[in-house]
Amino acid sequence: MKPRSQTMTTTLPLSATALAACLGCIAGLALAEPHVSGSNAITVAPGETGTCATSPCQVTLQMPPGDGSYEVTGNEVLIGTYPAGQAVNLGNYFESQAIAIKGAGVKKAYVYIPQDM
C-alpha cells in the first residue's frame, strides 16, 4: 500500500488579507491625481486635489511655467490675473474651490474646505 500524498493548504490570516487589500488601495492611489492636505493653508498646482482641515483656508496656487500672465477663476468666478511660474496667494476661502487657469491648457486644481455647522 502506497502512502497518500499529503497536500498542505495554507490559509492567510485576516491581517495578511487586509494587508493585501490595503496594498491594492495604495497602488490605486498612485494612479490617481496628486492629493495634498493642510491645516489652515494649502498650496496646490494644476491637476492636484487638496483638502484643508479648517475653514477659512488660505489657498496658494503654483502657476504653470510660461510667459506673461493668466486669469485664474475659482468656481467659475474671476479671482485675478497672475504671472506664470510663480506661487501666488489666492486668498482665504470658506467654501471648496475648483480653480482653473484660463488659456494655460492645464487641468483644474481642486481644494476641499469643510463647512462649519
Image (cartoon, rainbow, N blue to C red):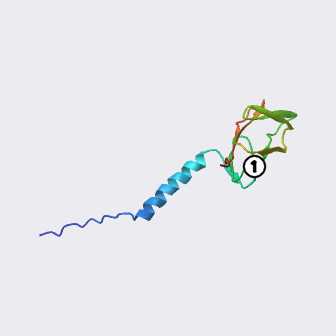
Extreme top residue here? 103
Front in this rendered view, residue 62 or 92: 92
Q: Compared to 4, does 56 lie above or below?
A: above
Extreme front residue here? 117
Q: Compared to 40, does 89 lie above or below?
A: above
At a point 31% along the width and 64% down the height, the residue shown is 9
At a point 39% along the width and 65% down the height, the residue shown is 13
Assign a secondary structure to mark 1.
Answer: strand
x%, y% of residue 41?
76, 52
x%, y% of residue 32?
60, 45
Residue behind mark 1:
57
Front in this rendered view, residue 2 or 16: 16
Looking at the rendered image, the quarter that the N terminus falls into is bottom left
| Disc 1 residue type (three-letter) | Cys
Numbered marks: total = 1
The quarter of the picture where residue 5 lies is bottom left
At a point 84% along the width and 38% down the height, the residue shown is 84
